[in-house]
Image: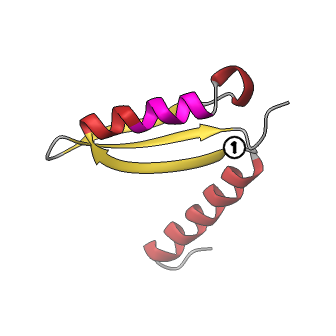
Protein backbone atom coordinates (compact mmCIF):
# COMPACT_ATOMS: atom_id res chain seq x y z
CA UNK A 1 0.00 0.00 0.00
CA UNK A 2 1.53 3.37 -0.99
CA UNK A 3 2.23 5.67 1.92
CA UNK A 4 2.65 8.95 0.04
CA UNK A 5 1.51 10.41 -3.27
CA UNK A 6 5.09 10.00 -4.51
CA UNK A 7 4.96 6.27 -3.73
CA UNK A 8 1.73 5.94 -5.68
CA UNK A 9 3.14 7.92 -8.63
CA UNK A 10 6.29 5.78 -8.68
CA UNK A 11 4.26 2.58 -8.60
CA UNK A 12 2.04 3.78 -11.46
CA UNK A 13 5.08 4.85 -13.51
CA UNK A 14 6.69 1.44 -13.06
CA UNK A 15 3.49 -0.27 -14.15
CA UNK A 16 3.28 1.95 -17.26
CA UNK A 17 6.92 1.21 -18.10
CA UNK A 18 6.36 -2.55 -17.81
CA UNK A 19 3.26 -2.33 -20.00
CA UNK A 20 5.03 -0.16 -22.59
CA UNK A 21 7.84 -2.67 -22.86
CA UNK A 22 5.41 -5.59 -23.05
CA UNK A 23 3.49 -4.32 -26.09
CA UNK A 24 6.53 -4.61 -28.38
CA UNK A 25 6.49 -1.11 -29.87
CA UNK A 26 9.46 1.23 -30.10
CA UNK A 27 8.53 4.79 -29.16
CA UNK A 28 10.31 8.08 -29.76
CA UNK A 29 9.12 11.37 -28.27
CA UNK A 30 10.00 14.74 -29.78
CA UNK A 31 9.44 18.40 -28.84
CA UNK A 32 9.97 20.55 -31.92
CA UNK A 33 8.72 23.71 -33.61
CA UNK A 34 5.65 23.00 -35.74
CA UNK A 35 7.44 23.08 -39.13
CA UNK A 36 10.22 20.81 -37.87
CA UNK A 37 7.73 18.43 -36.22
CA UNK A 38 5.99 17.92 -39.57
CA UNK A 39 9.28 17.21 -41.32
CA UNK A 40 10.41 14.82 -38.57
CA UNK A 41 7.13 12.89 -38.58
CA UNK A 42 7.21 12.65 -42.40
CA UNK A 43 10.83 11.38 -42.34
CA UNK A 44 9.93 8.82 -39.64
CA UNK A 45 6.99 7.51 -41.69
CA UNK A 46 9.10 7.42 -44.85
CA UNK A 47 11.83 5.47 -43.04
CA UNK A 48 9.40 3.11 -41.26
CA UNK A 49 6.33 2.70 -43.53
CA UNK A 50 3.04 1.93 -41.83
CA UNK A 51 2.48 -1.18 -43.93
CA UNK A 52 5.70 -2.82 -42.70
CA UNK A 53 6.17 -1.36 -39.20
CA UNK A 54 2.64 -0.31 -38.18
CA UNK A 55 4.09 3.18 -37.65
CA UNK A 56 1.95 6.06 -36.46
CA UNK A 57 1.82 9.22 -34.43
CA UNK A 58 0.71 7.79 -31.11
CA UNK A 59 -0.08 11.11 -29.43
CA UNK A 60 0.63 14.78 -29.83
CA UNK A 61 -0.09 18.09 -28.15
CA UNK A 62 0.52 21.74 -28.84
CA UNK A 63 2.82 23.60 -26.46
CA UNK A 64 3.27 27.34 -26.01
CA UNK A 65 5.55 28.99 -28.55
CA UNK A 66 4.18 27.01 -31.52
CA UNK A 67 5.97 23.82 -30.44
CA UNK A 68 4.56 20.32 -30.77
CA UNK A 69 5.29 17.41 -28.46
CA UNK A 70 4.58 14.11 -30.18
CA UNK A 71 5.34 10.43 -29.82
CA UNK A 72 5.93 8.18 -32.81
CA UNK A 73 5.63 4.43 -32.45
CA UNK A 74 6.62 1.49 -34.65
CA UNK A 75 7.38 -2.19 -34.44
CA UNK A 76 11.08 -2.93 -34.02
CA UNK A 77 11.33 -4.91 -37.27
CA UNK A 78 9.20 -5.60 -40.27
CA UNK A 79 8.00 -9.10 -41.11
User: Which residue is denoted by mark 1 in the rendering?
Assistant: 25
Can residue 11 be spotted in the picture?
yes
Q: Is residue 69 magenta?
A: no
Tell me: 60 left or right of 52.
left
Magenta stretch, main secondary structure, is helix
Identify which residue, 71 or 2, lies in the foreground. 71
Q: Is residue 70 above or below residue 18?
A: above
Look at 26% across and 35% down and name the residue there.
Answer: 35
Q: Residues within 10 Å of mark 1 (few under 14, many from 20)?
A: some
Which residue in the rendered view is the most extreme toward the right? 79
SS for callout 1: loop
Q: Where does the magenta region start and end?
A: 40-47
Image quadrant of residue 77? top right
Residue 19 percent coordinates (x, y) = 70, 52
Tell me: 5 left or right of 66.
right
Which residue in the rendered view is the most extreme toward the bottom? 3
Q: How many marks?
A: 1
Tell me: 52 left or right of 49.
right
Residue 45 percent coordinates (x, y) = 55, 29
Which residue in the rendered view is the most extreme toward the top? 51
Tell me: 4 left or right of 74.
left
Look at 60% across and 68% down and name the residue there.
Answer: 11
Q: Is residue 57 above or below residue 26?
A: above
Identify which residue, 2 or 28, lies in the foreground. 28
Identify which residue, 59 or 65, lies in the foreground. 65
Residue 46 percent coordinates (x, y) = 56, 28
Which residue in the rendered view is the most extreme toward the left? 65
Amino acid sequence: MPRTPRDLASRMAEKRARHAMADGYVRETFVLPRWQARATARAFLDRFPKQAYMSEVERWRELPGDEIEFTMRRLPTSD
